[in-house]
Structures are given as C-alpha cells and as structure tokens.
Amino acid sequence: MKVDAFDFDLPRALIADRPAVPRDAARLLEVAETDRDWSVRDLPALLRPGDILVFNDTRVIPAQLSGKRGTATVGITLHKRVAEDRWLAFARPARKLRVGDRIMFAPDFSAEVLEKGEAGEVALGFDRSGAALLEALRQWGHTPLPPYIKRPEGPDARDQADYQTIFAREDGAVAAPTAGLHFTPELLAALDARGVRRATVTLHVGAGTFLPVKVEDLRDHVMHAEIGVIAPAAAEAINAARAAGGRIVAVGTTSLRLLETVADEAGRLHPFSGETDIFITPGYRFKAADLLLTNFHLPRSTLFMLVSAFSGLARMQAAYAHAKAANYRFYSYGDCCLLHREKTS
C-alpha cells in the first residue's frame, strides 16, 4: 500500500496542548458498525464483566537534554537504551558532531559520541550508568514532549505529572503510552465494580514513534525497535480471561503491539523479554486483541496505519472525519476512541 492512503488534514486548533481535567473527563468515540460519542467515564458500561484491560506500565524518563560541545549548544533526545550507560539518541544539530566528541550537560555530567547514524541519530556513552544515570537525568533532563505540543519555554511542572500514567512503574520510556493517560483511581474503581479485570505489560516507548514514514510504499518502511516485557503472571492472567470468555482490551497501541508480538496462532500469550519491531498495516491478522482503546493519531503515521488495520481503513477515515466535525481533541493530550476489531471472513 501507498502511504498517501493514510493522509488526512487536521486543523491545528484540534491538537490538544493540555489534557482534560480530570483525566477521565476526556471524550471517547466508540468505533463500531455505528460510531457513538461517549465520555471516558462511560468505559465501564462499554465493557463486559470478565473483559481484561491490558495497560503499559512503562514510566517516561526525563529524556531531553541540552549540552555543550565546546561552545556550541547541542540538543539531545534519548530514544533507546542499549546498555546501562549507553543510549541511542537524536541530536540537534547532529551534522557537526564527530565520534569522540564529548557533550557536557553539567560540570560533572557528560557523554561521549560513540557512533553516528542517519537522520541525526547518535550513540552516546555516558559517564555513569544505571541508577546514577537515571538520577542525573532527573536532575538535568526534561520531559520529552511530542513536537506538536508547543512549549516555547520547554515542558513545565504540570507536564511532569500530566505526561505520566497512573500505572507508570518501569523506567525507560521517552514517550508516554497516551491511552493510559485517561485513567483515574475513580475510573479504575468503577471498572473493578463492573467486573473488568486488569493486567500490565511493559513496552518502553521510543521517540521513533513520532518519526514520519518517509517512503512511498509501506513495504519499504523500517520500523523502530522497542524493548518490551510480558511477565509470566501477566500472560497467565490474560490467557485465563480469554479462556473464560472475556475480551482482551489493549489500552494503547503500545500494549497491542506487544501482545501481537508474543501471541501464537491460537492467540495464546507467552512470557517475553526482548525487542519488538512489529509493523502492523492493513491485511494483518490479529491474534490477541479484541478491542483497542487509543488516542487519535497523526496522518501518515505508523499508528494510524495500525488502527486502520484493526478497524478497517474506510471505517477509520469515517471515524476521524466524525471526530474532526465534532471537535474532538487530537494526539497525546487529546481524546480517545474505543475500536472494535473489524470482522474478517
């Protein structure tokens, strides 16, 4: 397929710069045979007792840094950890960086350029590792907001809380699993009362999720890899829910991608720890997820391709047209939709 099939216009006014307050006050578009408008607070009524919600419990780290190479300022966005002291990152500007250059982020905090890649990517070796590196990032780094959220002065204190789900446990993401941002303790209590189960998996979302698809033919696109974990207890809980007749509801495209990575042909999940670069486009046969709760995505993005594979391209085009006409709020801080999987023969 051609990437142009996934293009659409979106007015800048519909891109959310702040989330709804409270979080579960966001709007929800149910995309099924007929589209229906709801609130996130209506989610318990849209699910059945025995269904299981699968959340991503990754925690966003302060992955944006500003440093100096000599007198020149260098902006760094970490996007994938490759060792306890090494990260792949996007550098701005990257053109003048050389292997062996040292970037100073603070008088006692620095990194060396180990490799240079394409599209501004560099491999950095930091002067510390593990918990010490994470502490330095917390001291000197900033929340890595998506480029479409405009903050001339940079992310603020409110973003530090807003751009983190209430499930965040495992440090390592540089972008939030945004469907999870809509959940509150009150909503979880209502879901519990409804008899809806919960499980968590971990997929450390990388900045590659915001990269545009630059090829014309989807077969030529190289998907970024991300690190994920499904613990044995989570796999067992999800399998048990399905065996009992419950539906698997992936909260976010990150959870869905990880579930589909590990599901066998019968839809059964297995424990997993490793990388996934699964690229889901129309024609993919889903094995695990029955429903998908997700935000509204960018045109020509791998995420819009994924939701089009899940519910059908024509249906998603119609749903997005409805959302635009009804002034839904788009992208990371925006509203969401509950997608029913397209029925296939």
Image: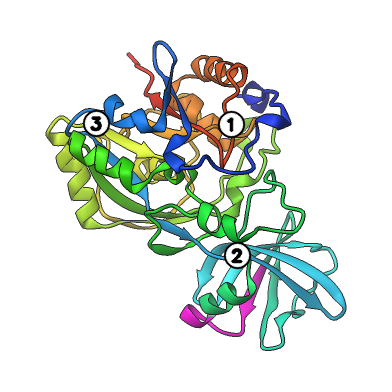
Q: Secondary structure at mark 1?
A: loop
Q: Pick whichever of labels 1 and 3 is earlier in the sequence.
A: 3
Please state the horizontal and vertical placement of residue 262, each as a whole percent of the image: 32, 46
Q: Is 220 in front, or is 60? A: 60
Say left or right for 202 vs 11: left
* N-term mark: 3 or 2: 2
Residue tagged 1: 329
The kind of secondary structure element at disc 3 is loop
Q: Position of residue 190 (x, y in %)?
A: 26, 38
Quadrant for residue 286, please give it.
top left
**Mark 2 or 1, nearer chain start:** 2
Q: Is residue 108 above or below residue 26?
A: below
Count the labels in the image. 3
Residue 247 got which mark? 3
Query: At 42% across and 45% down in the image, what residue appears?
Result: 180
Residue visible at 21% across and 28% down in the picture: 48
Q: Residues within 10 Å of mark 3 (few under 14, many from 20)?
A: many
Q: Position of residue 255 (x, y in %)?
A: 39, 44
Q: Which residues are magenta?
A: 123-132
**Nearest to viewer (mark 1 / mark 3):** 1
The reply to whether dot 3 and dot 2 touch (C-beta < 8 Å) is no
The residue shown at (67%, 46%) is: 149
| Nearer the observer, 136 or 256 | 136
Residue assigned mark 2: 63
What residue type is disc 1 on?
Answer: Arg
